[in-house]
Amino acid sequence: MSLPRIAFILLAVAAAACAGKMPQGRTTRYADLLSLFQEWRTFQRPPVVEGVPDYSVTAMAAQHAQLADFQARLAAIEPTQWPVARQVDYRIVQAEMNGLDFDHRVLKPWSRNPAFYVTVFPNQSDQPAREGPFAYGGIELWSYRFPLSPEDAERVRTGLRIIPRLLGKARENLTGDARGLWVMGIESLKEQSADLAALLPRVAGTTPDLTADIQLAKTATDSLVGWLESQTTSKGAASGVGIEAYDWYLRNVQLLPYTWQDLVALFERELGRSRAFLKLEEARNRGLPPLEPIANAEEHARRFNQAVTDYMAFLRDRDLLTIHPYLEPALRARIGTFRSGERDFFAEVDYRDPKVMRTHGFHWFDLARMAQDPGTNPIRRDPLLYNIFNTRTEGLATGWEEMMLMAGMFDGQPRSRELIYVLVAQRAARALGELMMHANRFTIEQAVQFATANTPRGWLRSTMGTVWGEQHLYLQQPGYGISYLIGKMEIEKLVARRADQLGERFALRPFMDELLGVGLIPISLVKWELTGEK
């Protein structure tokens, strides 16, 4: 080939690169990522047939086959010369696509997990999107004001009318053999039936059609429960994904630099640390009276409101966080009301010192920020798929508890320091339960037993719902139970690294402004964006 011809080709390649296009279908344009992202989010939803999401074998096989095209189109985008923030956006889209691939290859919630077909949700999640895999088209009842307006009543009816047909199709789709998911899914659908029954008096006098739709949805739910129960004896296989698949999920969806074995070692260490530190705190405080739980509604209202006031003043006075006007109302709105009777785990903590769980209420700060300042980046503006935000959301909320302890929030309440270590131990025990379930070394019953046995003070009771609900979620959604503490650890490492980088210029409030400013994305990507280090 002549030198002029070589020069011509080199010039053509350079011109294509400058124009944002690479030869052979490659592109370097960020706009192409944004365009692909919009198509991806539409494609990720299941096909809808006559208003009902289609999770049939045929539909899911077709979606999985088409996913390869989306992944190829993403691979044709070359992001390495982009600013780090845009490279992070690329990794977010890649992780979401990997999440759908994992669903098709391994998790298959539409065929293995009856709880996937629960679509009625009376309570708000504290996460950007509801935890776990669910069929498309859920009804978030908490988001409506009762009595319903005619427009809202019609929206609720639209969701309710799908339920009988969706649950009818569930009988055809649920062909998997995963006993733990099957048995716990029955309980989830029983809860949906109870929630629909509780909805009936709330809509009394709205429209007869709405009442009829609720009754039809409840009948369909009860019918599916009966069918599931009749099939239970044929279900005997383990429900976990296996260690190899779990490692793939950690690396490619959660974007964590750990293996299953790494996490077992880390959480065994964290369980030992928290229980040892609890004993040291108890020894230091042995001459002090124990913390008595709140006894009545008047005390509840007074102490919970005072806890919010004191907590916000602490953040402001210590200059730990930029205090936006929407933060305190968001936290105060979640106080709730006094409940008598036997307390479940978090109420045992909350009713002894309400300030402790206000720190974990960082979730409500996150949601308020999303509502008030969603930003303009379409990739980060809405919740990420497959709960991959959880190492940041659950990690920060959990880490903030101990960070506030170390910042001095409980210096005047030594017994409250003990509660922090009770919380850490519970998170470690339940995370180990998740890891053992997905390794198929524990059944869900054994995971529940392990978590209750290793949570101090007997507060995590197997006779109550918290421990069962948590382990069921973690069995459905790999990586969720571990996100609290691994996210906490990664945030602690990030604080240390930014302090190294900034030296004497480091301060917690500007650091938190940085961290919050990048959005609710996997903590490994937060680190990359803040430090410039992968």
Image (cartoon, grey):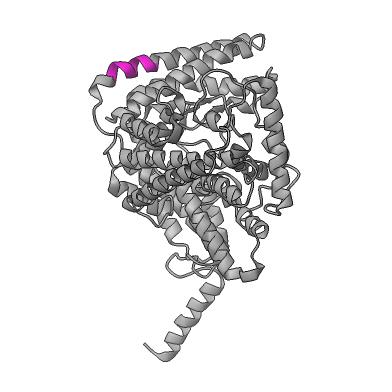
Q: From the image, which quarter does the N terminus lie in?
A: bottom left
- Left or right? Give the position of 169 relative to 154: left
Count of marks placed on residues: 0
**Majority secondary structure of magenta residues:** helix
Q: Percent position (x, y) of residue 155?
A: 61, 24
- Which residue does the image show at 56% across and 34% down from the upper left? 125
Could you tell me residue 498's position as x and y percent? 57, 65
Q: Which residue is located at x 49 percent, y 48 percent?
A: 391
Name the residue located 45 percent from the left edge and 89 percent from the top edge: 4
Residue at the far right: name it.
325
Q: Is residue 243 above or below residue 346?
A: below
Left or right, 397 with respect to 372, comes to left
In magenta segment, residue 212: no
**Residue 129 is at least partly visible in this image:** yes
Q: Does residue 89 appear anywhere in the picture? A: no
| Quadrant of the rendered image containing residue 214 | top right
Residue visible at 63% across and 59% down?
Answer: 511
The front one of 65 and 457 is 457
Q: Position of residue 260 (x, y in %)?
A: 33, 50
Q: Position of 351 compared to 481: left or right?
A: right
Please tell me which residue lies in front, 243 or 93.
243
Above or below residue 256? Residue 483 is above
Q: Which residues are magenta?
A: 224-231
**Residue 173 falls left or right of residue 37:** left
Of the pair 102 and 439, the residue shown nearer to us: 439
Measured from the top left, where is residue 360 in percent x and y? 58, 41
- The residue most toward the front is 287
381 or 50, which lies in front? 381
